[in-house]
Image (cartoon, helix red, strand yellow):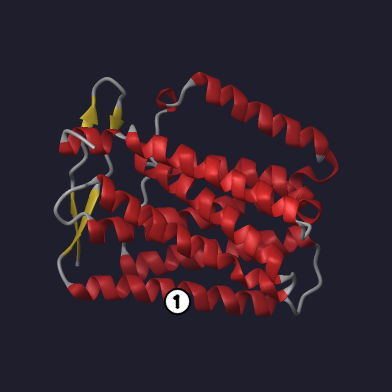
């Protein structure tokens, strides 16, 4: 049985609670979580093979595929792992400047892709929810629980961030079915960097809302340009490596300033 120990600490200056710690009463629960990850991978593969037999546009395929993935992940978690998903979020926790930038990104993407607005919006939104719940809400929580049995530490937090991000990156290996190895590796590098950044957001705010929101705007802006932006070239590879480094830097800064580390341990 999963035991939830409420270790959240309220930061009075920021109005932010530290992440809720998850403890495991038996090794059997950890085995269930590994089973959850394995089942998610198998189901994802099966769904993709089934959908290949239907004729549909790229955006419709993504929307249907991610909707099925979202439902399957939620069902597996409901009946197998029971990992709590945290959604509570206060908008005042975000700097107004970032909200303005976020709004401008969405407006710019909408203007560029007005003709396919609904298709791109739906595909990006379902992708953001499905992948953030799977890799941050459940997988990151899983690894964090393993390495923080004696309390939240900077090292344990980064181990959980890196482990969940590696799995998120490897999830893009399925793209080898329709594109080259070089493009797939480039995507995996970017996904790793974004995974670290997104996990850091989740850890910082103890809510899936910020990571889902950022994931959504990234996919919403990138989907219509995916083919052109992922051409197999050395220059594109260098750009992606640079972007990955920037995302890792942001993740480092976000985790470093997290009230979870400051309030629970008194220091980083």
Residue 206 visible in this rendered orientation of the protein: no
Percent coordinates x, y for residue 11 in the rendering: 24, 27
The quarter of the picture where residue 9 lies is top left
Callout 1: few (<14), some (14-19), or many (20+) C-alpha neighbours within 10 Å?
Answer: some
The residue lying toward the viewer, choosing from 31 and 171, is 171
Q: Position of residue 61 (x, y in %)?
A: 72, 64
Task: Name the element at disc 1.
Answer: helix
Q: Which residue is rendered at x = 59% and y = 79% of the image?
A: 46
Image coords of residue 79 (percent x, y): 35, 70
In the image, taking residue 215 as reference, residue 64 lies left or right, namely right
- Residue at 50 percent across and 68 percent down: it is 72
| Rendered-image quadrant of the N terminus | bottom left
Q: Nearer the viewer, residue 80 or 143?
A: 143
Residue 16 sits above or below residue 155 on the image: above
Please say if 31 is above or below 169. Answer: below
Left or right: where does residue 146 sit relative to residue 60? left
- Above/below status of 66 relative to 150: below
123 left or right of 57 in image:
left
Please give the name of the residue rendered at 31% of the width and 74% of the height, measured from the top-left corner.
32
Residue 59's quadrant in the figure? bottom right
The residue to which callout 1 is attached is: 39
Q: Quadrant of residue 115?
A: top right
* Residue 246 in picture, x, y percent from top left: 54, 40
70 or 264, which lies in front?
264
Locate the C terminus and report the quarter of the image it occupies: top left
> Residue at 67% of width from left, 59% of height from top?
63
User: Is any part of residue 1 visible from this angle?
Assistant: yes
């Amino acid at each position: 049985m999963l035991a939830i120990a409420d270790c959240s600490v309220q930061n009075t200056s920021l109005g932010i609670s530290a992440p809720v710690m998850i403890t495991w009463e038996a090794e059997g629960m950890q085995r269930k979580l590994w089973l959850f990850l394995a089942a998610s991978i198998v189901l994802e593969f099966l769904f993709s093979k089934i959908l290949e037999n239907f004729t549909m546009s790229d955006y419709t395929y993504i929307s249907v595929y991610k909707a099925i993935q979202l439902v399957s992940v939620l069902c597996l978690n409901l009946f197998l792992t029971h990992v709590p998903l945290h959604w509570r979020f206060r908008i005042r926790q975000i700097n107004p400047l970032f909200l303005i930038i976020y709004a401008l990104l969405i407006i710019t993407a909408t203007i560029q892709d007005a003709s396919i607005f609904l298709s791109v919006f739906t595909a990006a939104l379902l992708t953001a929810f499905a992948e953030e719940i799977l890799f941050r809400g459940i997988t990151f929580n899983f690894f964090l629980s393993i390495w923080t049995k004696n309390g939240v530490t900077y090292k344990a937090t980064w181990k959980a961030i890196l482990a969940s991000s590696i799995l998120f990156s490897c999830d893009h290996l399925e793209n080898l079915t329709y594109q080259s190895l070089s493009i797939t590796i480039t995507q995996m590098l970017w996904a790793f960097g974004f995974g670290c950044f997104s996990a850091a957001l989740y850890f910082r705010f103890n809510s899936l809302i910020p990571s889902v929101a950022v994931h959504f705007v990234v996919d919403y802006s990138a989907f219509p340009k995916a083919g052109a932006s992922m051409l197999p070239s050395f220059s594109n590879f260098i750009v992606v490596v640079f972007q990955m480094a920037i995302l890792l830097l942001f993740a480092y800064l976000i985790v470093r300033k997290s009230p979870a580390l400051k309030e629970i341990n008194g220091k980083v």
